[in-house]
Amino acid sequence: MTRDGDGVMSVGGCDVRDLADQFQTPLFVLDEVDFLERASAFKRQYQRVFYAGKAFASVKVFKWVSELGLGVDVCTGGELAVVMRANVSPSEVIMHGNNKSLREIREALGYRVGLLVIDSFEELARAQFVSEELGITQSVLIRVTPGVEAHTHEYIATAHEDQKFGFALAGGVALEAVKRAHLLPNLNLVGLHVHIGSQIFDASGFAEAARRLANFAAELHRDQNIDLEMLNLGGGMGISYLPEDDPLSIEEMAAKLQEIVHEVFAEQRLPNPVIAVEPGRAIVGPAMITVYEVGTVKQVVLDDGQSRSYVSVDGGMSDNIRTALYGAEYTVELASRKSSAPLVLSRVVGKHCETGDIVVKDAMLPSDLAPGDLLAVAATGAYCRSMASNYNYLPRPAVVGVNDGKAQVILRRESIDDLLSLEPN
């Protein structure tokens, strides 16, 4: 991102004012070079990398990561359909989900996905049934919940026992799942999977999960004569949403995790496994911004006598639910001009009929903000467009990719006609 002498922001060489005029606002703007550089950095550090499509999925993005040699991680039949449209090699697809239907499993195995992550005993039976029906042998991973408490929001912490994902190490549940999978004739047990949560800065949670998973794999070799080829350590690396955020570098995290796994396997005199990861947010999150147009500005006097500027924009919780859902925080700036006006305490809010429709809860913005100004909210690539809704019948925004002064549509803007087309005649 750069600014010219008038303070106008450009992304990928494209003036945000021109993008707003051409594609309307709200608008997701994806810096293609930034995205590709982050994806390539992960590829350099790990043996297997699967881009997590739940962060942001599109045919174009799946083609990009596939061309770089990354696989794709999907968790529903819908995301699988995008993978198929993008012609991603089936062997490079991993299928997740805690409640895969028979239809989804049949579609995934019919496409010959490389890996199916087993999340329950019911899924073991379903996977065996469909594999036998299709006359194939399907490679699978067992998802393990290692009892690690990640330092993140409760809703996105996924490795403690009291939650819906995977088989707990505690009580021998994961061991029983591995033993059953190993015996099923049409399943090829390749390895283990773990995911401790999302938006995590502290390496200790990842390190402890990796250690427990590696120790479990060593135990399987020693006590069950079961050897595993892969440890998939999931994703969840945090990104910088605020200036004070200080996430670990890709290189630091990779070195730490590989050191732990290799140490445990060396102690057991076992060959090192393939280490796989599933970064989504860490690739696409920082590479995208959202551009909004200011509609109204009003001053509200607070109980302590101070005032707050409420800046209403033309989107809101329909294109970014994370603030309302997780209490997420973002950085926002005036993007269409420079201002020398004093900064005032501001709250950027959406246009929806909800008090909780907040985009940025607390920000210092110029006091001369006016209707027609453009605001840019940083790091909105992950879980914003992918969790977007049509609340209040607002069409979802477009996503455009920018590179070297050119813009291309990645996902077009929805129209009212699109929404009305769902109504029966």
Image (cartoon, rainbow, N blue to C red):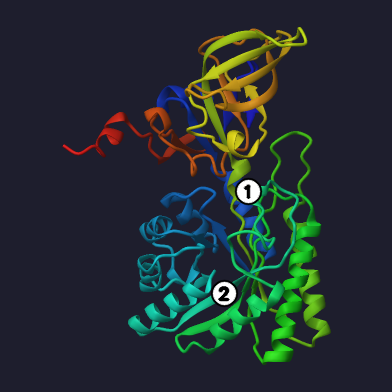
Residue 271 visible in the shown view: no
User: CA separation, marks 1 and 2?
Assistant: 24 Å
Q: Amino acid at mark 2?
A: Leu
Please tell me whether residue 248 is drawn above or below residue 417 in the rendered image. Answer: below
Q: Residue at x 65, y 23 (%)?
A: 333
Q: Which mark, residue 79?
A: none
Residue at which label 2 appears: 141
**First along the sequence among labels 1 and 2:** 2
For mark 1, what is the residue?
A: 155
For residue 136, which quarter of the picture? bottom left
Given residues 185 and 176, the one toward you in this image is 176
Q: Secondary structure at mark 2?
A: strand
Name the residue at 61% across, 49% down: 281
- Residue 383 coordinates in the image, percent (x, y): 55, 44
**Which residue corresponds to the image point at 42% horizontal and 25% vertical from the top-left?**
24
Report the side of 98 relative to 236 (left or right). Answer: left
